Image (cartoon, helix red, strand yellow):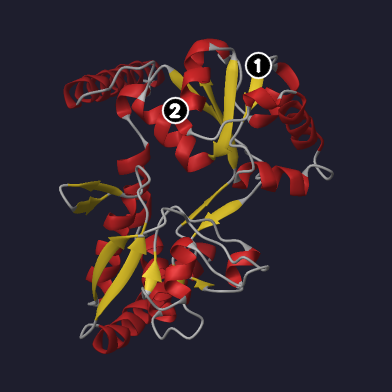
Amino acid sequence: MMIKLIEIFNLSYLLSSLFILAISSSSVSAKILVGVTIKSEPFINVENNKFTGFCVDLMNLIEDFTGLNYSLYLVQDGTYGFGNERTGQVSGLIGDVYYKKADFAIADMTVTEQRKQYVNFTEPFLRFSFSALARKSLVKNLQTMDDLAIKSDLAIGTFMNGKTMINMQLVRDKIRNVLWLYDQLMKNKTNLVTRLDEALYKIYHERYAFIQEEPKNLYLASKDCSLKMLQDQNLYVPGEYAIAFRHDSEYLQTFNNAIKFIKYKGYLKRLIRKHFYNPKCMNGGKSINHQQQQQHYYFVHLIISICFTLYWTTIR
């Protein structure tokens, strides 16, 4: 009975989503929406004035499902943005949307309460927590952030005054292992960095683990099989990436419906696999090609056939 209920719900959800998207597309397809973004691999890459990356693939799916057209440009000040309560000015991606230079902003931009004062965010397209990146040889027996806190003697670093450091500070008094990690950051501030290349140098040359948002460490680990990411399975420091619109935007619900539909159809999982996973870094650093898979399936089938034959012979 539960399976049937799920099937009915899924069919209803699918039909309603298609209906909403069909209505939405008729109202937005006539206008080209202008989006602002920022360079940050693998979310946004720019080469020969052409945008590529996870966010571009996501926007192309939204374009397909809604019928809208869009264009992108890079934010001038090179920041994600926030509102300065003292001056009243809003910077970065958030500022361009707030001041109506852009219809929307898309990037690896974290949803925060402060930013919500100036923009509305869509349904999140990624949910994550913090993570740590280190050389595999140093963390062979470690899998999680709890392991890093309890079992490791590595130096720990992160971006100085970055989002991860601020979020750890907010929850440290509630979660013992986060408190321990945060205290380690504060004990030796030379392990705090301002640029990613500084962090990577420490990872490769020191007994060092670098803490930042999970998608970014996952991407770095996919590029170099000698690196390993430690996950936060308990979501101690949760975060979300979403698309920003003005508070009065008529397109917010259209994007929400499209993102929900893309998740439902499994397209978002495909994008994550495409941009954040490297088969060569799995299975001990060796990729499994199609021929190896066929040999594996043949071997399993052979074993099952032998076992069945022996069983049938025995009972007869």
Q: Is 5 or 193 nearer to us in this picture?
A: 193
Q: Residue at x 59, y 12 (%)?
A: 207
Does 272 appear above or below 280? below
Q: Is 278 or 135 nearer to us in this picture?
A: 135
Q: From this viewpoint, which residue is outermost toward the front?
A: 87
Q: List x then y, in percent, for residue 9.
A: 46, 73
Does 249 appear above or below 2? below
Q: In which quarter of the view is residue 69 placed?
A: bottom left
Q: List x then y, in percent, for residue 52.
A: 24, 50
Q: Are marks 2 and 1 in contact (CB under 8 Å)?
A: no
Please, what secondary structure does the residue beneath circle 1 have? loop
Please, what secondary structure does the residue beneath circle 2 have? helix
Amino acid identity at mark 1 = Leu
Residue at which label 2 appears? 197
The C terminus lies in which quarter of the figure?
A: top left
Q: Residue at x 37, y 75 (%)?
A: 101
Disc marking residue 89: none
Work out whether mark 2 precedes mark 1 in sequence or the reverse, and give the earlier one: 1
Residue at which label 1 appears? 154
Q: Is residue 314 visible?
A: yes
**Front position among marks 2 and 1:** 2
Q: Is residue 236 visible?
A: no
Does 110 appear above or below 312? below
Q: Mark 1, residues whose alpha carbon is within 10 Å: few (<14), some, or many (≥20)?
A: some
